[in-house]
């Protein structure tokens, strides 16, 4: 499902801001309905936490907007590769936010990912450099909301966090559209194909994927799920080859750099699993 999110940036023929506006609206509606039926908590009593959720919701929204902008300027494969730099940002953000020791091995692996991005982009055209810039900003936003959400999840149920952040995203983009004078009935003019893909993105690739992930973690453990999520670049690139024929747009340097990045991402997940096992042995 997550691998499909990048592909949909090409399949949906709407501006990135509008795509995300629909995504958060549909995801909020679907998740809210599910939580109401299952009687999940939907309120946050602490006003300070509400403001934090609003702030992180804006960051999540900016992440998605810049992500789809990157894809629309170039390819789904490039957009998803840029997200691999998220790891580098997490290495310096987690010690600040979560108060954990700085991990030099993660920082070095993050630098290798940066080298992979540089290798991939060494012969880019001007519009592809613009796509790269949007993609890297998207990765920074992804790191920020991942770390902040981990902090918030210590006190607030994760479905409630997501519900508030989707609502924040909808309100935030609506305000931007009002400021631009674009919030009108024209936003609802689209093809049947775009409408169906938006439903797929909002319900399955956002709400459903999030809720199912929570349940899968309980059954398979965090490492297996983390590894699966870290393999998202592989899913997206393979889907882009078969659905978008992007192999005709990408050269051998791209795939060499992509392979390096993917190996580093998987290796990083393996290291984290080893560290977790060592910590558990110490505790036992």
Image: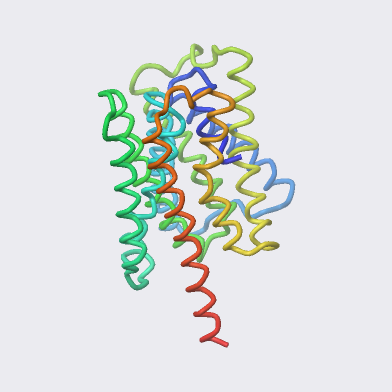
Name the image quarter holding residue 96: bottom left
40, 229: nearer the viewer = 229
x, y percent for residue 155:
51, 65
User: Quick one: which residue is furthest to the front in this view?
Assistant: 252
x, y percent for residue 259:
44, 45
- Where the C terminus falls, by quadrant? bottom right
- The residue at the point 54 percent across, 15 percent down is 188
- The residue at the point 50 percent across, 23 percent down is 10
Q: In the picture shown, does residue 10 fall above or below 43?
A: above
- The residue at the point 32 percent across, 61 percent down is 107
Q: In the picture shown, does residue 179 fall above or below 79?
A: above
Q: Is residue 215 left or right of residue 168?
A: right
x, y percent for residue 2:
56, 41
**Colour treatment of the image:** rainbow
111, 132: nearer the viewer = 111
66, 171: nearer the viewer = 66
- The residue at the point 60 percent across, 60 percent down is 224
Q: In the picture shown, does residue 276 fall above or below 243?
A: below
Q: Is residue 155 left or right of residue 88?
A: right
- Where the N terminus falls, by quadrant? top right
Q: In the picture shown, does residue 5 fall above or below 230?
A: above
């Amino acid at each position: 499902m997550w691998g499909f999110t990048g592909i949909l940036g090409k399949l949906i023929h709407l501006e990135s801001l509008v795509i995300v506006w629909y995504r958060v609206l549909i995801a909020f509606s679907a998740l809210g309905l599910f939580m109401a039926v299952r009687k999940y908590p939907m309120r946050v009593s602490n006003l300070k936490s509400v403001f934090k959720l609003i702030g992180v919701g804006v960051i999540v929204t900016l992440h998605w907007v810049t992500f789809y902008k990157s894809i629309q300027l170039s390819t789904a494969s490039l957009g998803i590769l840029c997200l691999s730099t998220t790891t580098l940002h997490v290495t310096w953000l987690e010690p600040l936010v979560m108060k954990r020791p700085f991990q030099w091995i993660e920082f070095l692996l993050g630098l290798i990912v940066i080298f992979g991005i540089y290798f991939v982009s060494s012969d880019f055209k001007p519009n592809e450099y613009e796509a790269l810039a949007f993609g890297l900003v998207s990765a920074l936003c992804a790191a920020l909301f991942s770390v902040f959400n981990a902090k918030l999840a210590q006190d607030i149920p994760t479905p409630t966090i997501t519900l508030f952040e989707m609502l924040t995203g909808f309100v935030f983009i609506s305000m931007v559209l009002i400021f631009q004078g674009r919030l009108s009935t024209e936003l609802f003019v689209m093809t049947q194909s775009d409408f169906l893909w938006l439903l797929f993105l909002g319900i399955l690739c956002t709400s459903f994927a999030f809720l199912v992930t929570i349940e899968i973690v309980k059954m398979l453990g965090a490492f297996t799920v983390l590894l699966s999520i870290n393999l998202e670049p592989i899913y997206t690139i393979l889907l882009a080859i078969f659905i978008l024929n992007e192999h005709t747009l990408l050269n051998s340097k791209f795939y060499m750099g992509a392979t390096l990045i993917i190996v580093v991402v998987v290796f990083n997940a393996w290291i984290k699993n080893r560290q977790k096992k060592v910590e558990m042995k110490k505790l036992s």
